[in-house]
Amino acid sequence: MDTSALMMPVECDVRVFDELDRLLGDVEFVTPAAVIAELETLATGAGEEATAASVGRDLADRCRVVETDASYADDALVELAERGECEYVVTNDGPLKDRLLERGVRVIGLRGRNTLNITQP
């Protein structure tokens, strides 16, 4: 789970965990520590982004937090995927999606208004 995925409930009106249950069934959710740090930083601001980050931080409690060598969230997600610690990455970030697909990683992202979809590499 990346930062944008955890912020989807506020920013895109997506019930992200319900959608993931629909797509994948019962799975363990993982997020890198760098994503948690990014959410915590964004949550200190003001406005909708800060609200979305605060909600995202609360939702991250449903995820196992994994340490990586990377301090930048996108790099940490790529590292986890390359280590084989995740079968999918959930993101709404276009450049990250492209990086992952180039590396053969399946990506789950927003399709339409409030539905998630799996993109195969």
Image (tube, grey):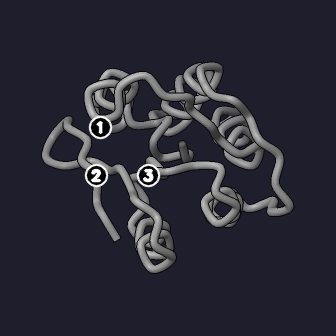
Q: Position of residue 118 (x, y in %)?
A: 28, 51
Mark 3–mark 1 Cα distance, whole angstroms, equals 12 Å
Identified by mark 2, the residue type is Ile
Residue position for label 3: 91
Q: Position of residue 42 (x, y in %)?
A: 64, 41
Q: Nearer the viewer, mark 3 or mark 2?
A: 2
**What is the number of the mark on residue 76?**
none
Identified by mark 1, the residue type is Cys
Q: Residue at x 45, y 72 (%)?
A: 104
Q: Nearer the viewer, mark 3 or mark 1?
A: 3
Neighbours of disc 2 within 10 Å: few (<14), some (14-19), many (20+):
some
Decide if residue 90 is on the left or right side of residue 19.
Answer: right
Q: Residue at x 44, y 51 (%)?
A: 91
Mark 1–mark 2 Cα distance, whole angstroms, equals 17 Å
Q: Residue furthest bottom?
A: 102
Q: Secondary structure at mark 3?
A: loop
Q: Earlier in the sequence, mark 3 or mark 2?
A: 3
Position of the N terminus by quadrant: top right
Identified by mark 3, the residue type is Thr
Q: Nearer the viewer, mark 1 or mark 2?
A: 2
Q: Is 58 situated above or below 81?
A: above
Residue position for label 1: 12
Q: Earlier in the sequence, mark 1 or mark 2?
A: 1
